[in-house]
Image (cartoon, rainbow, N blue to C red):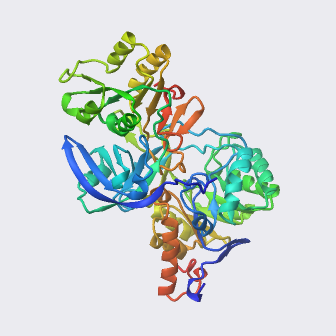
Amino acid sequence: MIFKKNIPAFTKGLVTENQHLKNEYYKIVINAPPIAEIAQPGQFVMLSKWKIKELLLKRPFSFYEIEPDRDNFSLLYKKVGKGTAIMSELKPGEYIELIGPLGNGFVIPENVKNIAVVARGIGVVPMLSLVKQGRKENKGIYSFLSASKNELLLGNDIMESLSVNTFYTTDDGSKGLPGNVTMFLEDLLGKIPDVIDAVYTCGSKRLARHIRELQKKYHFHAYISLEERMGCGIGSCKGCVIQTKHGYQRVCKEGPVFPLEEVVLDE
Amino acid sequence: MNKGTDLKIKLNSLFLKNPVMPASGTFDVRDTILNKKQLSSLGAIVTKSISLEKRTGNPGPRIWETDGGMLNAVGIPSKGFEEFKEKELPLLKEANDTIIVSIVGNSNEDFCNLAGKLDQIEAISALEINLSCPNLNDGLHFGINTVVMAKLINNIKKSTQKVIIAKLSPNVSDITEMALAAEQAGADIITIANTLVGMAIDIENQKPRLGNKVGGLSGPAIRPIVVRMIWETSKVVKIPIIGVGGITCAEDALEMFLAGASAIQIGSANFSSPLVMFDVIEGIKEYLRRKNYSSIKDIVGIL
């Protein structure tokens, strides 16, 4: 029924930190109890700090860190347009408007021992809370991180600290090896075929296609968090669809996390 | 309710407890985060357009934000009549006692068959005809040709006893011609207006922003156009007008009432703020009080 529990909240959030990390990347910490209490890794919020007449739509952001005991969550974002430019100017003590938590987050199946996360650049964002959740459930974490260059690797120190092993690739070879990040995953699976039970990735369909090929060979669970232009974030506008084996599905409602094998990855 | 805040209004034979409702396609009872009390306090609920058979809608991207608005090319996905009846209708009945079902079709037959089926459902108060769809039979667009549109409305009127609302396309040279044609064909109410056709281009990749290349522009940017269309139309038709296009607050809505609308719909602003419709209701009440009007009816079309 519509009047269900754990319904997303339309609420104000208090900015407690807004830190410029590097280049165009920022991390914002927000205090919003109704959201932080129930947020799950892989879910997202819709956020605005503007009047509808200034910018019509809220912007979607995946949770980076979730701290229910402090009623906080953080978002890691790249300043790319008008909305994120306004966000980058926010000061602690200011309020923003939020809808969340939204969508379906990551699932860690019960029988899983080790998980791999494969992320490029800002695609690492939804992975950190997943990895923390995985550690809580005593899963071994293997991280495969890539970026065009070393300075565009995000959150890699903390990811590395939580992982059994972390593999890096950068396009220019400034950290780890140049090439595809999935080649390390392939190497690992080639050496110890059953080591990874579930693979998680975000955003890039190119990465996802590589993982899908490996999945066919090694039969692990695989999940992808997708993004698409969103109108409402709650399912009403039907704007953010992707093509799946079951037809068009909404990233905001049926996603943003989908079983990899259900997503149509052709360009 | 005290005397200064009477928002009740009758649009032809359609009674509304207040004149504020969501615009079709911007609100879905299956996905709303509003609670039961909030849902029931809306003037009506207008569904997304439903079609007789399942429609998949357009490939993505379906949405692109523009200055002061947004383009959408969602393409009217619909689960079809049977699923609507089984899954959505029970929720609608629970949510509000005035249900307006938006209908769409690819031919006169499609529309009429659907209207005939909906006619059997007592809980439905009115049908809003989404005219912004090409007629696949003769290749003409229902909403931009007076003859094609009038024939459709006339046929639908024969298929159902329900109140018929014609949602006009603004993509015409003279909205009053369309409105008069709709009135003469038997429409009980007209909605002004649907989205304006627009386009945005990604100059780096040199491609359209939308999967469908072109889409409908909505949001604050189109409001002055719609206000003008309501004002022009209210001078020439006798049937009531529902205004829609870019309302984000009570002040925006009041412009439309003064121009001649008897009720209003809120569209893309719902995406940003699920509570905007309630803010508008409160703001209208406050205005009536401040200006010493006893009823919303007193300000309709005073310009």
Q: Residue at x 60, y 84 (%)?
A: B1
> Toward the viewer: B271 or A22?
A22
Please tell me whether residue B52 is drawn above or below residue A51 in the rendered image. above
Q: Where on the picture, by quarter, is residue B240?
A: bottom right
Image location (x, y in percent) of residue B172: 56, 55
Instruction: Identify whether A155 is placed above or below B151.
Output: above
Is there any visible trace of residue A57 in the rendered image?
no
Q: Is residue A74 left or right of residue B98?
A: left
Which residue is outermost to the top? Answer: A191
Is B119 on the left or on the right of B199, as rendered? Answer: right
Choose top left, top right, bottom left or bottom right for residue B206.
Answer: top left
Taking the image as shown, residue A200 lies to the left or right of residue B18, namely: left
Q: How many marks?
A: 0
Work out which residue is located at the far front of the displayed protein and give it. Answer: A138
Where residue A191 sits in the image (x, y, percent)? Answer: 36, 10
- Can residue B102 be seen here? The reply is yes
A55, A112: nearer the viewer: A112
Query: At 57% from the left edge and 77% from the top edge, which residue is drawn?
Result: B301
Q: How far across and down, in percent of the image, does residue B29 sit? A: 61, 55
Residue A143 coordinates in the image, percent (x, y): 32, 27
